[in-house]
Amino acid sequence: MDWRDNSEQAAFRAEVRALIEARLPRRYREMAEQGGPGERQWEFDRKSPDAAAREAAVAWHAALAERGWVAPHWPKEYGGGGLTPMEQFVLNQEFARAAVPPVGGSGVGLLGPTLIIHGTPEQKAKYLPPILAGEATWAQGYSEPGSGSDLASLQTRAVRDGDDFVLNGQKIWTSGAHTADALFALVRTDPQAPKHRGISFLLIDDIKTPGITIRPLTDMGGRHYFNEVFFQDVRVPARNLVGEENRGWYVGMTLLDFERSNIGGAVGARRKLHELIDVVRANPVLRERVNNSSVRQEIAQRFIETEVMYQFSLRVISMQNRGQVPNDEASTSKLYNSELSQRLAQTAMQAVGMLGNLIEGSDESFGRSYIGVVPATIRGGTSEVQRNVIATRGLGLPRG
């Protein structure tokens, strides 16, 4: 199949590249040269004590907002870009190639689409504009200590009391809660109902609401992305219920017409592989080490796998471009990419030897990448969950 751009795609790609070249702040350009900013860098920068970081966040948001690319998948009537899946693919591909940070966080990626489909007119009018303007970021309150892969078993309770719900319970692995302005959560409103029912979707529009406590979870690399969030008699107005009470599970699973190819992961894997190859080629000691070991074959195998991942991303977007909805294909893409990222990091560590123990400080420092991919096969659905989806929805096998 010919994957080359047609004339419209080529023109759009040129537009995206021109924007990155002209408007990407120096801060993010320099981060890209060091492996790229994290996926939540913009969210952290907008509340950073460093004025230069805040200025970079504002400038990059403004550049994207001019074209509606803060929320490229939202319909234009709600302030989004209204891009087709193929246009989203090209945009994501070029952003990944340049390692630029996305803006808007979970508010743009998850909550906005949910409100567009399930929100009341009042909720849309109140919450969508601040998300687009970069004035409000949202954290996602889904996972709990005993409810991760089996999310429907969540236990955080919300009890109706007059015009409010009263929340008690705990969420965990809540990314960016320490810098977010608000939080959307799945909570149990009917403990007697079957577990996928009796769940409601609530908006906690001020994360500093009395009764909320946020505790940091620091990862192996010393970075603070995740948090525990505790609720003790937290009052949330009933008007902040999205969709029907006890039907929140179906609200929370909503997606708009997302581009779901995972091209960002495929491009990122390619970039990491070529960084490793460049380091090995430039260092005579490492070159000799690789030439006299099985690592050379491992690097070749990682090259094959990154190309497989890239081709699979193209297959998924071609499905969406024909109006088909990827289901088990999206799970296959997520599974393959997350496990590939771990194999690639392991190969890099083997190639550079003891230098791989460095977290940072030299071109051969792959330690941070190695640590960073440890949770890749857990977050966003474990590998075991993805394989079950592939088996049941893709292959038609009976559930275990």
Image: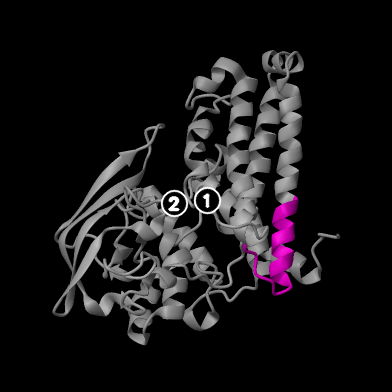
Name the residue tied to disc 1: 385
Between 189 and 333, the one nearer to me in the picture: 189
Residue at x 56%, y 43% (from the top left corner):
32
User: Can residue 272 be seen?
Assistant: yes
Q: Gap between marks 1 and 2, in whole Å?
A: 7 Å
Q: In which quarter of the image is residue 249?
A: bottom left
Q: Residue at image x 65%, y 69%? A: 325
Answer with mark 1 or mark 2, whichever residue precedes in sequence: 2
User: Which stretch did the figure color magenta?
Assistant: 311-327
Q: Main secondary structure of the magenta part?
A: helix
Circle 2: residue type: Ser
Residues tagged 1 and 2 counted as in contact (Cβ below 8 A): yes
Vertical position of residue 64 compared to residue 276: above or below: below
The location of residue 179, given as percent across then percent down, is 31, 53
Left/right of residue 384 with respect to residue 163 in the rendered view: right
Q: Position of residue 217 (x, y in %)?
A: 31, 41
